[in-house]
Image: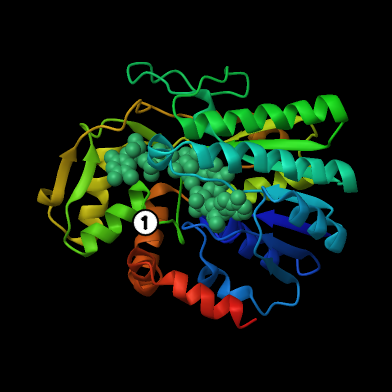
Amino acid sequence: MNIIVTGGAGFIGSNFVFHMLNKYPDYRIICLDCLTYAGNLSTLAPVMNNPNFRFVKESITDREAVYKLFEEEHPDIVVNFAAESHVDRSIENPQVFLDTNIIGTSVLMDACRKYGIKRYHQVSTDEVYGDLPLDRPDLFFTEETPIHTSSPYSSSKAAADLLVLAYHRTYGLPVTISRCSNNYGPYHFPEKLIPLMIANALNDKPLPVYGEGLNVRDWLYVEDHCKAIDLIIHNGRVGEVYNVGGHNEKQNIEIVKIICKELGKPESLITHVGDRKGHDMRYAIDPTKIHSELGWLPETNFEDGIKKTIKWYLENRKWWKTIISGEYHNYYKKMYEGR
Ligand code: NAD
Ligand code: TDX
């Protein structure tokens, strides 16, 4: 089996590459990633010499490069993680979100149509459903919940999802979509809530909580997300959407306090700052479909997952300190140009 994994130098994509190479020694994994600020080749260092792994530095928006890769590799499956993924950045500058998340998805699917494919899988997000009110804990997102986006990021992801479903209906492309809640774990870029708070707390810097910090996110350990995608690409029904989430809702302020406690840092580091524009109040996934159809259940509870994550950030200071300082670009140049 030849699998193209786009965005494999990012947070979830890299965890997925490791999961697949470990679990399927007969599979060939080709990582297609253009290494934006969020992509980090050092993350993939442990697999760079694996004969079943190839790294290709190209953008999913580059049609010629994508077609060339398909001609070289004849992929059976494409799993598209590549995206601009940070909501705050999308509020500052939406354009690149539209280019990568929408146009990039269409280029990949055009290549799938042109060269043939067993499965195209789109990694999407619960943010396409918009948000839920805080005073209705009985409500959850199901696959039938209408698309109702808030940010340029979530709108670009929703547009991509609609294109994926249109390519299925119009051209018969064998697609699946997963819509997952907030992930956390190793290699999470330190601009997102959990790794940012860990890094700042370790540096005794202020912990910037947007507004009152009452917004709720449904946190899932990244390995559980990777296992869900693995199940969907092998056993999921073509044309279907699967919600992925672990019923682990927490307010942002709770998360930050847990991190302070685990690291032995004072809560006085918490600083309430201006709110995110259009800030979604609550995300909460109903994962009944993937559980009943594919037998998926999360395996890591939050207590263990956050301990493992904090331990990883403590043991891998070099990884995130380099990213924060921007030196990882130099690392990349050395690594890649020497190859
Ligand atoms: P990330 O920002 O950590 O990584 C994105 C990766 O995509 C980077 O390696 C980057 O270099 C690459 N990339 C960006 N533009 C590209 C392009 N034009 N061509 C090729 N590569 C490109 O993102 P993440 O958090 O790992 O998210 C991965 C996917 O999962 C995204 O599609 C995101 O929407 C989705 N998702 C994320 C979460 C979450 O909690 N992080 C939850 C649900 C869904
Ligand atoms: O400094 C911060 N302070 C803060 O209070 C940051 C970075 C975030 N927040 C809040 C905003 C959100 O309510 O924490 C919550 C989580 O924020 P992010 O880590 O930016 O994640 P979110 O906006 O929920 O989106 C994430 O989950 C869904 C991913 O970045 C998306 O790619 C994914 O689709």
The kind of secondary structure element at disc 1 is loop
* Above or below: residue 191 compared with residue 130: below
Q: Is residue 40 above or below residue 299?
A: below
Q: Is residue 95 left or right of residue 277?
A: right
Asked whether mark 1 lies closer than 8 Å to ligand 2, one says no
Horizontal side, residue 33 vs residue 108: left or right = left
Q: Residue furthest left?
A: 268
Residue 338 spot, x, y in % from top left: 61, 83
Residue 250 in which image quadrant? top left
Q: Is residue 63 visible?
A: yes
Q: Which residue is mark 1?
A: 190
Residue 161 as seen in the image, left or right of residue 92: right
Crowd around label 1: few <14 · some 14–19 · many ≥20 (10 Å): some
Quadrant of the rendered structure where residue 279 is? Answer: top left
Q: Is residue 182 visible?
A: no
Q: Position of residue 148 (x, y in %)?
A: 52, 19
Amino acid residing under circle 1: Pro
| Residue drawn at the location 47% of the way across and 76% of the way down | 331
| Residue found at x 36% / y 52% | 191
Q: Where's ligand 2: which quadrant?
A: top left
Left or right: 325, with 11 as reference point: left
Residue 304 point in image, percent of width and height: 40, 55
Say which quarter of the image contains residue 199. bottom left
Residue 270, above or below 242: below
Look at the image and tell me in which quarter the C terminus lies: bottom right
